[in-house]
C-alpha cells in the first residue's frame, strides 16, 4: 500500500475526537492502518500524546478503522468532489456548476457558500440570463434538453416556465454601483419606472429624503436600498437577490430581511437570496442550500436544508446527509468567559471631540484605547463612525479637542477604489520589505497575497481588494490600526479568517485595532470591547467611550430594538424573531445580547 498521490480522484479527511480516543481506539487505529502495515507512517501518537494522521495521507481504505473502533472517535469522510447534475460549464476546463436550487412560491431560499463557488451563476441560470449548457460550452443546448436532465425534480416546473416565457424574474445584482445605467436618473425616476406603487418601500427603506437625488450621488447603503426596492417593485414571479446586506447597517439589514419575507408571502412569489451575513440569512430564509466545492474550479449545490441545520452543518464543515466534508476544520465561537484579558495600559487617551459639517455634527466622549486590544465600533449608518475613525487617523481635524500628535495611525478606508494598473506586489513594495520573514508569516501568508501579487489593483474583485486593503493597513508601522468595514465582499470563511487574524495580530504586536463593521458575527468574533454610536442619522452623532462586550451590545441592540441569543450547539449569535417569546423575555430582562 502506497500513500495517496496528488492525482487521486477522491480525497478524504480524518475527523478525530481526541476526548473520545481510548487506548483501545489507539491500538486499533495503529494496528489496522494500511499505511502502517505497508511500512509507511499513518496513524501514530504525537509528542503531545494525541492520535494523529497527516491530512494528505488519509484515504478511503482508512474507513476500515472507523468500522472497527467501538465508538465514533474517528470518522473518515470524503472531501468535496464533482457530483450531481452538471448544469453549466464556462469554456473547456472552466468552472463547472452542479445542481440548482428550486424556487418555491411563498418562500425565501437562501444560498450559503464561499466566493467563486457558483452562487451568482445559479442565480443567472434561474433568471434565464444564462442558458445552462449542461457541460457542453461549445454546443447550443435547448430548454427541452435541460428539462429532461431535471425531469422528476422540483426544478422541472420552473425550467418549463422559463422555456415557455411564463415566468418573470427580477435580479438584484451583487454590485450595487451598477444600479443605474444613467448617471442622471433620480431615485424617484428609478422607482416610478416600476409597475407597482413605491410608497411602502419608500417608507420601509427610509428613502423619502433622497427621492430627488441622482443615483450617481448616493452612498453605497442608499444605492443598496434603492436597488432592493426597485427589484421588489417589479411585480415578478421570482426575485433573485445577490448579497442584499452590503453597505447596510444592522437595523437596515433586518428591515430589508423582514420586507423581503413579507413581500414574498403576500404576493405568493418566490425568492432566492445569496447572503454572507449569517444573522440576516437566518432571519430571512425559510430554507437554505449550501454550495461547496473548489472555488474557481467547481461548485455543487447541496440538497435543501432547514436554515438552522444548514448553517450549523456549514459551520461544522460537514454535510451529514451527503457525507461530505466541505472544510477541514469547523468554525467555532468563543464564549464570553473565553475572551482574553487584554492590557489595562492605555496607549491613546482622547478628550471630548467635536466635528461640525453643514448638516451634520459629531460629539465624542473621552475614551482610551489600550495596548493589544481589539475594539469593535457599532452604530447605524450616518452617525459619524467613519468621521470618528478619520479624526483618530488624523485625516480630519476636530473643531474641538485634540488628538495626541505622537500617535501614528494606519487606516483602511470604507471604500477602496483603485484606478491604477499598479500591481499588488508593487504597492506592497512601496510600504514594506515583502521579502522579510516577518512580513511573509505575519501578512503575506495569512492574507493569501502571493496569488494576487502579479494582478493589477484595478483588476481585483471586491473580496480580493478587501484582503489587500486590510493587509496594507497592517503592513505599515503604526501605533493604532483602524479598519473600516473589513468584512465587505468577503464570504463567511474569509470573514472568520480575517477576524481571527486581526485579533492575533493585535495581540502579537501589542497594538490596538479598531474595527468598524455591521456584521455582528464579525464584531462578536473580533472585539474585546465596543464603542457604540447613537443619535439621529444624517443630523447628529454621539460616540460613547469603549465598554465591555456585554454592556456595549446591550446598549446598541436596545437602541435598535433587536435581541440576540446564542445557538445552543455552535454558540453563534442568532437574531430572535421580533415579538417572539425569547425576544420578549430578553427585552423584559434588559438582556439584548445573550452571551451564554
Image (cartoon, grey):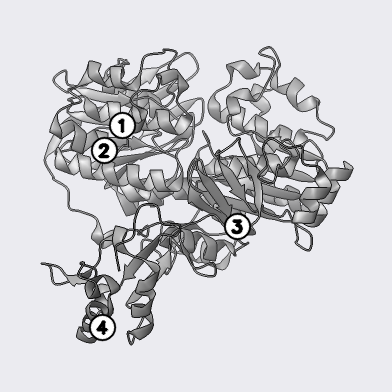
Q: Position of residue 431 (x, y in %)?
A: 22, 19
Residues at discs 2 and 1 in contact (Cβ within 8 Å): yes
Q: Secondary structure at mark 1?
A: helix
Query: Separation of disc 4 and disc 1 at Cα?
Result: 42 Å
Q: Position of residue 266 (x, y in %)?
A: 79, 52
Query: Separation of disc 4 and disc 2 at Cα?
Result: 37 Å
Question: For this view, does 261 lie left or right of residue 506?
Answer: right
Which label sits in the foreground, 3 or 2? 2
Q: Position of residue 448 (x, y in %)?
A: 32, 37
- Visible residue check, residue 182: yes
Q: Earlier in the sequence, mark 4 or mark 2?
A: 4
Can you identify the residue that label 2 sits on? 445
Q: Residue at horizontal 14%, vertical 68%?
A: 46
Q: Residues within 10 Å of mark 4 (few under 14, many from 20)?
A: some
Q: Residue at horizontal 21%, vertical 24%?
A: 476
Residues at discs 4 and 2 in contact (Cβ within 8 Å): no
Amino acid at each position: 500500500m502506497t500513500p495517496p498521490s496528488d492525482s487521486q480522484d477522491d480525497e478524504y479527511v480524518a475527523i478525530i475526537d481526541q476526548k473520545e480516543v481510548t487506548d483501545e481506539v489507539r491500538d486499533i487505529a495503529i494496528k489496522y492502518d494500511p499505511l502502517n502495515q505497508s511500512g509507511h507512517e499513518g496513524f501514530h501518537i504525537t509528542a503531545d500524546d494525541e492520535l494523529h494522521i497527516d491530512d494528505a495521507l488519509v484515504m478511503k481504505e482508512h474507513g476500515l478503522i472507523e468500522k472497527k473502533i467501538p465508538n465514533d472517535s474517528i470518522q473518515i469522510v470524503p472531501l468535496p468532489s464533482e457530483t450531481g447534475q452538471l448544469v453549466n460549464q464556462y469554456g473547456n476546463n472552466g468552472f463547472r456548476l452542479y445542481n440548482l436550487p428550486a424556487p418555491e412560491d411563498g418562500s425565501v431560499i437562501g444560498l450559503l457558500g464561499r466566493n467563486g463557488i457558483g452562487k451568482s451563476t445559479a442565480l443567472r441560470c434561474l433568471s434565464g440570463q444564462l442558458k445552462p449548457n449542461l457541460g457542453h460550452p461549445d454546443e447550443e443546448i435547448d430548454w427541452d434538453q435541460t428539462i429532461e436532465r431535471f425531469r422528476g425534480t422540483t426544478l422541472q416546473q420552473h425550467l418549463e416556465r422559463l422555456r415557455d416565457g411564463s415566468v418573470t424574474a427580477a435580479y438584484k445584482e451583487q454590485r450595487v454601483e451598477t444600479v443605474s445605467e444613467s448617471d442622471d436618473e433620480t431615485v424617484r425616476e428609478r422607482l416610478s419606472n416600476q409597475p407597482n406603487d413605491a410608497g411602502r418601500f419608500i417608507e420601509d427603506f427610509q428613502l423619502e429624503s433622497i427621492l430627488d437625488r441622482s443615483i450617481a450621488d448616493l452612498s453605497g447603503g442608499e444605492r443598496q436600498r434603492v436597488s432592493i426596492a426597485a427589484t421588489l417593485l417589479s411585480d415578478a414571479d421570482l426575485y433573485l437577490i445577490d448579497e442584499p446586506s452590503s453597505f447596510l447597517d444592522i437595523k437596515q439589514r433586518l428591515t430589508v430581511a423582514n420586507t423581503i419575507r413579507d413581500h414574498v408571502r403576500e404576493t405568493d412569489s418566490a425568492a432566492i437570496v445569496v447572503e454572507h451575513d449569517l444573522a440576516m440569512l437566518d432571519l430571512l430564509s425559510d430554507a437554505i442550500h449550501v454550495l461547496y466545492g473548489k472555488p474557481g474550479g467547481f461548485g455543487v449545490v447541496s440538497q435543501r436544508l432547514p436554515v438552522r441545520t444548514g448553517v450549523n452543518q456549514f459551520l461544522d464543515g460537514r454535510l451529514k446527509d451527503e457525507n461530505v466534508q466541505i472544510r477541514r476544520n469547523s468554525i467555532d465561537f468563543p464564549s464570553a468567559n473565553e475572551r482574553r484579558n487584554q492590557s489595562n495600559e492605555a496607549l491613546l487617551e482622547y478628550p471630548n471631540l467635536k466635528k461640525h459639517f453643514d448638516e451634520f455634527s459629531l460629539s465624542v466622549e473621552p475614551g482610551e484605547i489600550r495596548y493589544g486590544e481589539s475594539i469593535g465600533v457599532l452604530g447605524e449608518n450616518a452617525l459619524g463612525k467613519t468621521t470618528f475613525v478619520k479624526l483618530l487617523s488624523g485625516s480630519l481635524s476636530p473643531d474641538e479637542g485634540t488628538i495626541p500628535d505622537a500617535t501614528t495611525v494606519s487606516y483602511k478606508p470604507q471604500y477602496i477604489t483603485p484606478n491604477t494598473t499598479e500591481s499588488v506586489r508593487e504597492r506592497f513594495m512601496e510600504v514594506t520589505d515583502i521579502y522579510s520573514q516577518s512580513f511573509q508569516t505575519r501578512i503575506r501568508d495569512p492574507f493569501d497575497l502571493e496569488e494576487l501579487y502579479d494582478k493589477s489593483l484595478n483588476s481585483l474583485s471586491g473580496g480580493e481588494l478587501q484582503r489587500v486593503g486590510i493587509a496594507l493597513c497592517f503592513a505599515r508601522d503604526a501605533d493604532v490600526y483602524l479598519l473600516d468595514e473589513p468584512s465587505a465582499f468577503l464570504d463567511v470563511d474569509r470573514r472568520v479568517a480575517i477576524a481571527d487574524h486581526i485579533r492575533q495580530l493585535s495581540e502579537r504586536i501589542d497594538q490596538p485595532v479598531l474595527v468598524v463593521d455591521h456584521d455582528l458575527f464579525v464584531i462578536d468574533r473580533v472585539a474585546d470591547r465596543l464603542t457604540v454610536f447613537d443619535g439621529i442619522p444624517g443630523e447628529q452623532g454621539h460616540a460613547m467611550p469603549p465598554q465591555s462586550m456585554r454592556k456595549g451590545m446591550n446598549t446598541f441592540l436596545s437602541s435598535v430594538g433587536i435581541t440576540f441569543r446564542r445557538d445552543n450547539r455552535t454558540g453563534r449569535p442568532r437574531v430572535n424573531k421580533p415579538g417572539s417569546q425569547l425576544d420578549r423575555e430578553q427585552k423584559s430582562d434588559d438582556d439584548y445580547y445573550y452571551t451564554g
